[in-house]
Structures are given as C-alpha cells and as structure tokens.
Amino acid sequence: MIELADMKLFVQAVLSGSLSAAGRELGFSPAVGSKRLSRLEAQLGIRLLQRSSRQLSLTEEGALYFERCQSILGDIANAEAELGQGLAEPRGLLRVSSPVALGRHYIGPALEKFARRHPGLQVQLSLNDHVVDLIASGFDCAIRIGANTDSRLVARKLADNRRVVCASPAYLGGNGAPQTPADLLQHSCILMQGTGAMHADWHFTAADSGEEQSIRVRGNWLTDNGEQAHDWAIAGLGLVRRSIWDVRSALAQGQLIEVLPEWSSNSAPIQAIYPTRRYLPLRTRLFIDLLVQEFSV
C-alpha cells in the first residue's frame, strides 16, 4: 500500500526541485526523505526521479505519476477543506515574491494582516522588480503585473490595472504637459528597465477611436527599480509611466499629475501566480483569497 506521506513527499520534491527542501516542508530529515522516496519507487517498480547532487528531474514515468498524484492530493485537500468548514489552520512557511512598490504598499500589509489571523504561520516576502523563476526558487506564489507566459504556472487575477504617464507639478510647470503621445519626444522620460538602454518604446491606444501609437521615448534617468523611478518623478526629473496602483496615492495627494488620460498605455492585470491548481497548500489558497478581497476595495 502506497503511503500518502510518500506521495506528498514526491510531489513536493518536484515542485520545490529539492528532496531536502521537500523533506523540511513535511517534517522529514534528508535521510528519511530519501528512504521514503526510494521505498515509493520500489513499491511502484519504476524510477520516478533522476537524482544528482545538484538537481532532480522527472523520468517519463515519473511525469505521468506526478500528474496523477497532484489530482489525488488535490481531491483530498478539497475534501478536507469542505469537511473542515474553516476549522483547518494554515501553518508552515509562506513564501511570496512581489514587485517592490506593489509589495511595500499592498502585499506587505496584506501579509501582516494574514499572519495576525494565523499565528502558526511564518512569512517570507521577496521584493524584486525582476521576474523570478517561481518553481526553481521555491516560492508559494508570486504577484505580477501582466500576462502569465509560463505554462507550468496558474494565474488568478487580483485586479484590473492600467499604466499611467505622470509627472510632478514642478516638472509640468516648467516644461508643459504633453497633449499627444508624439509630444513625449520633446520631454525627458524616466525609464524603468534592466537593459541599460536610455530609451524605451511606450505603446498607447486612444480611448475613443482605438488608434494605436508607439513612441520611442528618451531620458537621462534610468533605473531597474520602480520605487526609485517614482521618487525621481516626484522630485521633478521627468515623466514616468507606472501602474495606477503604484501611483494612485501620489496622484490623490497632488504629488504627481496624470497626463494623456485619454490614451491608455499597456493595460495589464495584477495577478497571483502559483505552481499548480491542484494540491495547493491551504496557506497559499487562503492568502490569495485575502488578496482578492484587498484589491477589490
């Protein structure tokens, strides 16, 4: 008879990319975890994983078994959640990745609220404006702006979003406000990217006609950090293009003013990304549910 704990260990090892990490997650020592996996393979009569000192890789048979295990464990988790009627308490380490500004202003406070509700949790929040490999890094979920392009991952939309172009009153007072996207060619734009190029292509769509324009903007200020770009814009150094969620407080306080409001710029939803729809840890599922509530306010 296959033990459920061995099946969980196998699935967690695949998701985390490490048998040791999977063992720690489930409370097994590395030695015990290795023995359990070997026992599972012996019972099945097949090799599930190719193991080396640095990485794990699924065999063809292991990939098929992995899909079935996810389905089985997902059904069990769903049944327990339904029967528990909220009595189950999430525990363990919740690891979340988020862009810097979004993390500081929204995800961090949401994690604080979540951890206060569930004191058995540990929380780790990584703030980085670069896209991380969710599976290789072992995160439970990532918060991202834009479409999910990784077929291994599942996305759940948290909020609609649009990018806005804005600048400080001081900058607009000295340089005027652009009236069309083409006017941006006469302005200094704060660029946010990691390529090192002092130019970027900003795409716009007219709200009334649907006309599309692409403008190659330039500027003297470049960073790979959204918070820094935000601070430079408030300091009057140029026009910046940011998510409305990142700048709505500054807009409300008059620190920044939106320009070109009749032109939309690359709308992209805010989404929670996680490795699999099945066998989703209770802590991850409940936290994503909380984020949906928080962004709906």
Image: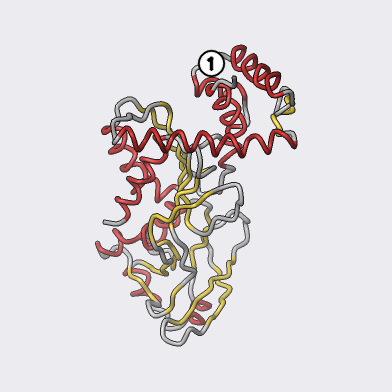
Q: Closer to the camera, 221 or 42?
A: 42
**Quarter where residue 176 is shown:** bottom left
Q: Where is residue 184 in the image (x, y as percent from the top left)?
A: 49, 77
Q: Where is residue 59 in the image (x, y as percent from the top left)?
A: 74, 34
Q: Closer to the camera, 174 or 65?
A: 65
Position of 111 compared to 98: left or right? left
Q: Closer to the camera, 176 or 148?
A: 148
Q: Position of residue 131 (x, y in %)?
A: 56, 48
| Helix, strand or loop under label 1 | loop
Residue at the image point whose x is 43% and y is 28% from the top: 93
Position of 133 compared to 237: left or right? right
Q: How many labels does the image show?
A: 1
- Give the residue at the far front of this rendering: 1
Residue at the image point whose x is 50% and y is 24% from the top: 25
Q: Closer to the camera, 185 or 174?
A: 185
From the image, tell me which residue sits under label 1. Answer: 28
**What quarter of the picture does the C terminus occupy?**
bottom left
Residue at the image point whose x is 60% and y is 27% from the top: 10
Say if 180 sits above or below 151 in the image.
below
Say if 223 sits above or below 2 in the image.
below
**What quarter of the picture does the N terminus occupy?**
top right
**Quarter where residue 199 is shown:** bottom right
Position of 53 compared to 241: left or right? right
Say if 38 sits above or below 266 in the image.
above
Q: Position of residue 130 (x, y in %)?
A: 55, 48
Name the amino acid type tagged 1: Phe
Residue at the image point whose x is 56% and y is 57% from the top: 193
- Give the residue at the far bottom of this rendering: 209
